[in-house]
Image: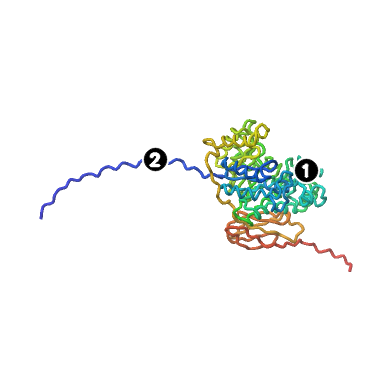
């Protein structure tokens, strides 16, 4: 055998240590990618075929992905198939359905259409609708006990040139809900926006005798409450919230993928992010009685569009705009949020700055409005076309909010719910309703003046509903709204005292 051969050991070549390359910080997902434009119906824009075609063309050139198109204005519609009558403006083209045409043209250009509804709009006293079936003719200020108007303590009903419907009158609420739902039922709109979903400015509203009678019956209060009475304010605020809840449930029952949005109030200085106590001292909460943080938390809104109408050059308004955006983002729950800015109050440069700051925080952006896109157009120093070109140049410049095409094709965050109604009682409103899963109360709400209730954030699966001693078990679907049978509640009737007489 040959002797072993000694082989020198050669050390393995050194392997360089891996170099760690820091990754760029992860960008949080945007809260909303909506880029929208409001199109109002108080002037040209939606009243002829030619105008509607021009709106869609101009919006496509601007680069927005959504049109918030005014549909129901003051109890009348820019359409022919709603539960409310068409507008009767003299310049409205005969046999023309704007909502049909704008959805067809906008969808062909890749834009969504949200039908914008002035929910409590009852009448414009300066230019009233002439249809005999208009709400102002059937339930207006001269209809006596059949009136649905919101009133001051002295019985007056006008706020400027407008009359508002009272959300606390059950028949008026039925009318308002149907005016919104009929649009989703009859048109391929991508959603609805609730505007004027509140009481008028000033706080001293809701004094129709029917509203006061309901308040006394449900709360046990005596006399006529002062406008500043916190209990009275809270009760009326709940009527507004109940109206939002019912609209959302009924829209989702027709089409679960329809977006429910609202145009919400941002009066005065903003609360700090997350400071709900400060919000509850704001005019939004105490004056016009909007509680939109609750609407978002309970899933009543898919998208909250702040009417953040500020002028950067006036006092602290620029900081207020940014502050309201930050507050809304901090309390949004699962809802999307967009900042709506006032094109008509600002120059194109300020509009571009406000839009850029808004989307930089992850919010969507919507501009008000197509018809008055700059301060100079609003002041009649510039045509609408000139104004649109000016804001297009500003918004699409490098770094601008519309510098590149942004899609907004996601599904709404709320796709299911449960609704029901109690009947058989003389006081159907203000009843506590609980949703129970696994023996635990997971949600609680109250009935509205018609006995309606519902939930939009329940997990899918079995649930038990409890109200007034009644119980009903049902399963919440993954998608859609389950409607429970009416639950019969009987008022307790005291037995008459024995009198000894036959």
Which mark identifies residue 496? none
Q: Residues within 10 Å of mark 1 (few under 14, many from 20)?
A: some
Nearer the camera: disc 1 or disc 2: 1
User: Which residue occupies the foreground of this view, 269 or 257?
Assistant: 257
How is the model colour-coded?
rainbow
Q: What is the total number of numbered labels drawn onto the structure image?
A: 2
User: Which residue has dot 1 on it?
Assistant: 125
Q: Position of residue 281 (x, y in %)?
A: 68, 40
> Which one is earlier in the sequence, the residue at label 1 or at label 2?
2
Image position of 33 (left or right of 203): left
Cα distance in 3D space between marks 1 and 2:
68 Å
Q: Nearer the viewer, residue 61 or 318?
A: 61
| Residue displayed at 65% across by 33% down | 382
Residue drawn where x is 89% and y is 67% of the image: 501
In the image, taking residue 391 as reference, residue 222 lies left or right, namely right
Residue lying at the far right in this picture: please name it. 501
97, 211: nearer the viewer: 97
| Camera-side residue of 262 and 23 | 262
**Location of the N terminus (image quadrant):** bottom left
Q: Secondary structure at mark 2?
A: loop
Residue furthest out toward the bottom: 502
Secondary structure type for disc 1? loop
Is there any visible trace of residue 102 in the rendered image?
A: yes
Does residue 221 appear in this view? no
Q: Which mark is residue 21?
A: 2
The residue that appears at 46% across and 41% down in the rendered structure is 25
Which quadrant of the rendered structure holds the C terminus? bottom right
Residue 217, position in %: x, y?
77, 53
State the image coordinates of residue 85 (x, y, percent, origin top left). Answer: 73, 51
Number of other residues with Cα within 10 Å of mark 2, as a class: few under 14, some 14 to 19, many 20 or more: few
Q: Quadrant of residue 314?
A: top right
Percent x, y for residue 167? 73, 49
């Amino acid at each position: 055998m040959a002797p072993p051969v000694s082989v020198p050991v050669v050390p393995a070549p050194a392997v360089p240590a891996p170099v760690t390359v820091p990754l760029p910080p992860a960008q949080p997902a945007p809260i909303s990618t909506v880029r929208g434009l409001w199109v109002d119906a108080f002037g040209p824009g939606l009243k002829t075929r030619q105008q509607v075609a021009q709106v869609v063309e101009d919006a496509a050139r601007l680069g927005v992905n959504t049109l918030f198109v005014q549909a129901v204005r003051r109890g009348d519609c820019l359409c022919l198939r709603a539960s409310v009558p068409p507008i009767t403006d003299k310049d409205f083209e005969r046999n023309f359905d704007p909502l049909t045409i704008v959805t067809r043209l906008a969808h062909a250009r890749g834009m969504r259409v949200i039908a914008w509804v002035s929910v409590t709009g009852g009448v414009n006293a300066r230019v009233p609708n002439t249809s005999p079936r208009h709400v102002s003719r059937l339930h207006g200020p001269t209809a006596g006990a059949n009136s649905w108007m919101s009133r001051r303590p002295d019985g007056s009903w006008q706020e400027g040139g407008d009359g508002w419907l009272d959300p606390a009158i059950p028949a008026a609420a039925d009318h308002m809900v149907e005016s919104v739902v009929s649009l989703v039922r009859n048109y391929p709109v991508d959603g609805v926006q609730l505007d004027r979903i509140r009481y008028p400015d000033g706080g001293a509203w809701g004094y129709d005798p029917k509203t006061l009678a309901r308040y006394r019956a449900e709360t046990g209060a005596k006399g006529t409450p002062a406008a500043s009475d916190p209990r009275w304010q809270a009760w009326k605020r709940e009527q507004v919230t109940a109206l939002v809840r019912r609209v959302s449930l009924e829209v989702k029952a027709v089409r679960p993928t329809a977006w429910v949005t609202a145009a919400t109030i941002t009066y005065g200085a903003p609360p700090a992010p997350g400071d709900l106590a400060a919000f509850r001292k704001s005019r939004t909460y105490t004056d016009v009685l909007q509680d939109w943080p609750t609407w978002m938390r309970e899933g009543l809104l898919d998208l909250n569009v702040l009417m953040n109408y500020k002028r950067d050059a006036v006092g602290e308004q620029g900081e207020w705009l940014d502050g309201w955006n930050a507050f809304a983002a901090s309390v949004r729950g699962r809802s999307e949020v967009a900042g709506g800015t006032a094109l008509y109050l600002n120059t194109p440069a300020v509009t571009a700055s406000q839009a850029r700051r808004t989307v930089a925080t992850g919010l969507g952006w919507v501009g008000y409005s197509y018809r008055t896109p700059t301060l100079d157009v609003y002041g009649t120093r510039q045509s609408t076309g000139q104004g649109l070109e000016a804001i297009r140049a500003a918004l699409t410049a490098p770094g601008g909010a519309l510098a590149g095409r942004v899609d907004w094709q996601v599904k709404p965050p709320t796709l299911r719910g449960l609704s029901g109604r109690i009947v058989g009682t003389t006081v159907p409103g203000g009843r506590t309703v609980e949703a129970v899963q696994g023996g635990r109360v997971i949600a609680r709400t109250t009935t509205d003046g018609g006995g309606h209730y519902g939930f939009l954030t329940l997990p899918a699966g079995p649930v038990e509903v409890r109200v007034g001693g009644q119980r009903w078990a049902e399963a919440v679907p993954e998608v859609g709204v389950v409607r429970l049978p009416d639950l019969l509640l009987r008022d307790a009737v005291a037995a008459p005292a024995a009198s000894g007489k036959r």
